[in-house]
Amino acid sequence: MTVALAAASPVSAPLLAQDAQGFQSYLEILSRQAAEAGVRRETIAAVIPSLTYNPRVIELDRQQPEASPNAPIPAFEPYRRDHVDAQRIARGRAAYQRERWRLQKIEAQTGVPESIMVAIWGHETNYGTVMGGFDLPRSLATLAYEGRRRDLFASEFIATLKMIDRGVPREKLVGSWAGAFGGPQFLPSVYLRLARDGDGDGVADIWSSEADTLTSIAAYFVDAGWRPGQPWGFAVSVPTSLDRNAIASRTTAPRCPRVYGRHSQWKSMAEWRALGLVPQTRAWPGDNIQATLLEPDGPGKTGYLLTSNYRVILDYNCSNFYALSVGLLADEVERQP
């Protein structure tokens, strides 16, 4: 996931010293929680004393968009141009062709489209080239100490220790400042639950094995409810006569309400066709497939009909811009020139 970062304000030396001292006290709490969760005492003893407070991850966390939930939503088109660009498409097509024999097998086993696996890989780490350089235990312990999402990060820190218990080398535990790592950018708890060995060597190595990375992405999508044979969605032209008030959603999503709040009511493809919508890049799929309408740049611009499989992409990263770009990149990767 790409995060736009604002300029960080400097942190005073007294505050840093105070946090560093408080962090060391908090590590004692994490140690007890890890032991209660079944982490081996040898692992706790090897990792905990090596950790120091990292103010940089706190700066990055406080600059996240969710800190300003009422900020205006920008236009999608500039984001699309940056994330479904010629270079990412070209590299995705090359990866698609290089791994085609493997991708076909994974799709046959899981029902997750080859191009979707490649597009997630491309968006998360630019096909394995940008995977982060933060020490995961240090980052997660710091974020847990800071407290804004303590339960989440404390749990992920303990999951990281459990990865070591499972035999993952300590030196591999490097990733993003927020704790995601490897080709798919999994959190530690997701790795423990869904990482897969795709090349048969007995190890789920999502850091350096393309087979394991792609197989693990597919496992995530299966777990999240991907429906084989259904598109993620597609671009549509929306008539100016459409009564948007009549199709507005009347429900509030418990998760990511601002993301889902931009979607219309669910209607069948037959109903959308009757309302005058016209696909821009493909034929209509089955009449009974349900979809919502999203117009990310407002009336008069390209809209998108989105199926339940789009919601699976949102489960991976709850952002309409991210999910739309994954779907569009997947379409471009599959569309060989």
Image (spheres, helix red, strand yellow):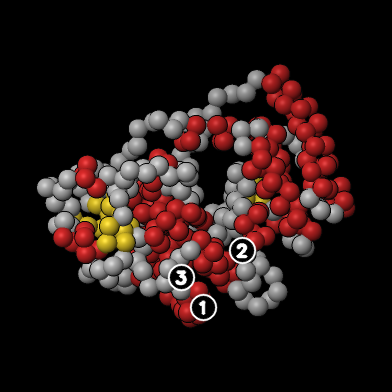
Q: Residues within 10 Å of mark 2 (few under 14, many from 20)?
A: many
Residue 166 at x, y percent in the picture: 77, 62
Q: Residues within 10 Å of mark 1 (few under 14, many from 20)?
A: few
Q: Name the image quarter holding residue 253.
A: top left
Residue 191 at x, y percent in the picture: 64, 59
Q: Residue at x 39, y 60 (%)?
A: 308
Q: Is residue 138 above or below residue 180?
A: above
Residue 87 at x, y percent in the picture: 38, 59
Residue 200 at x, y percent in the picture: 65, 78
Q: Which residue was labeled with disc 3?
A: 112
Q: Kindly state the secondary structure of the residue where label 3 is placed.
A: loop
Q: Amino acid at mark 3?
A: Val
Q: Which residue was labeled with disc 2?
A: 194
Q: Is residue 72 above or below residue 190?
A: above
Instruction: Name the residue at the left extreme.
Output: 241
Q: Residue at x 34, y 66 (%)?
A: 231
**From the image, which quarter does the C terminus lie in?**
bottom left
Q: Residue at x 80, y 37 (%)?
A: 29
- Nearer the N terminus, badge 1 or badge 2? 1
Q: Is residue 67 above or below residue 272?
A: above
- Marks 1 and 3 sit apart, C-alpha to C-alpha, by 8 Å
Closer-to-camera residue (148/180): 148
Closer-to-camera residue (111/42): 111
Q: Which residue was labeled with disc 1?
A: 109
